[in-house]
Image (cartoon, rainbow, N blue to C red):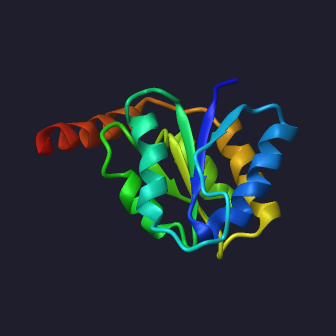
Amino acid sequence: MEKIAIASDHAGRELKEDIKEFLSSIGVEFMDLGVDNDNSVDYPDYGILVAERVSKGEVPRGILVCGTGIGMSILANKFLNVRAALVSDVYTARMAKEHNNANILVIGGRIVGKGLAREMIRTWIEARFEGGRHQKRLDKISAVEKKDK
């Protein structure tokens, strides 16, 4: 299975640590890009580390966690080839992959409990992009990205 890059800010660190345990338990390799304590940090500093690697194709997927997930998702979607999806339930996690081929999953550490986060991640990992009409839509998004660069 492919490696997943994961990072959080201080508000998401506790959930990130639980996610790492979960990924290990299901045999998914990951790279933890921080943080490793609860000292206040700026989430962009850590979101960039994951989004850059996904954008450049160094890793196929990433997971980002901050307090609400909003900041990390805004940041990650600034990067070319990144489709970051902020999810809060199992259905949106599945749709993020099946319809949007999201390559970064973003979770709010102060919003989502550990059990739900695990189920969302499992669903996202196991889901497959459906392509078809959804690919046409993603192509339109890619065209906007290329136009802006």
Left or right: where 22 falls relative to 78: right
Residue 149 or residue 143, whichever sits in front:
149
Name the spot of residue 29 as percent of width and height, x first.
72, 31
Image-quadrant location for residue 36: bottom right
Q: Position of residue 24 (x, y in %)?
A: 82, 38
Horizontal placement of 22 versus 41: left or right? right
Residue 25, percent across and down? 87, 40
State the image quarter where residue 14 is shown: bottom right
Q: Which residue sits furthest top?
A: 1
Q: Against 47, is 3 above or below? A: above
- Name the side, left or right, on which 131 lies relative to 147: right
Report the number of discs: 0
Q: Residue furthest right?
A: 25
- Residue that appears at 82% across and 31% down: 27
Residue shown at the point (45%, 36%) measured from the top left: 54
The quarter of the displayed image where residue 3 is located = top right
Residue lying at 35% horizontally and 36% vertically, measured from the top left: 81
**Quadrant of the rendering where the C terminus is positioned:** top left
At x 38%, y 30%, the residue is 56
- Can you say which quadrant of the picture contains the N terminus? top right
